[in-house]
Amino acid sequence: QVQLVESGGGLVQAGGSLRLSCAASGRIFITNVMGWYRQAPGKQRELVAVITSTGITNYADSVKGRFTISRDYAKNTVYLQMNSLKPEDTAVYYCNYGGPGNYWGQGTQVTVSS
């Protein structure tokens, strides 16, 4: 089992920044992928950014150049630095761990006001 604890969501004005954190604990395998997904009201959950255990990253086109995913391997923590936020970034953001098994965090609300 893997547990994920997210933090860092909130309300911000358009153009502002937020940083999300997700700490993983439990049976963490050396080879894994961690990332962030989001779900806006009435829409499907979508990938935002992922990072492998070797540091390879992948971003949704809509966030490229604005969001940066990183991880602290010693702390088993993944971060999402979100800059130049737009109202369309408003969603519940979920942390994901993929290794043997697939696990989700509880979600953290990000609201961007215009």
Image: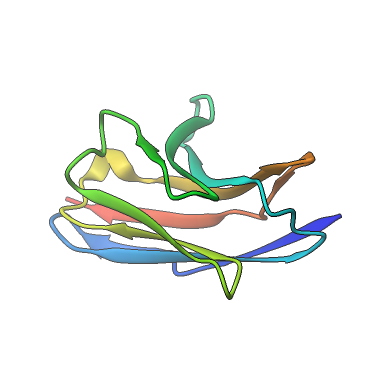
> With 49 as the anchor, is 6 left or right in this view?
right
Percent of width and height locating residue 60: 34, 31
The number of callouts visible is: 0
Percent of width and height locating residue 108: 53, 58
Q: Please name the residue shown 25% across and 31% down the image.
A: 62
> With 26 as the anchor, is 87 left or right in this view?
left
> With 97 as the anchor, is 56 left or right in this view?
left
11 or 80: which is nearer to us? 80
Q: How is the image coloured?
A: rainbow
Picture quarter with the N terminus = bottom right
In the depicted structure, whether residue 74 falls above or below residue 18: below
In the depicted structure, whether residue 32 falls above or below residue 81: above
In the depicted structure, whether residue 14 falls above or below residue 86: below
Outermost residue toward the right in this view: 1
Percent of width and height locating residue 85: 21, 51
> With 3 as the anchor, is 57 left or right in this view?
left
36 or 38: which is nearer to us? 36
Q: Please name the residue shown 18% across and 62% down the image.
A: 16
Percent of width and height locating residue 77: 55, 67
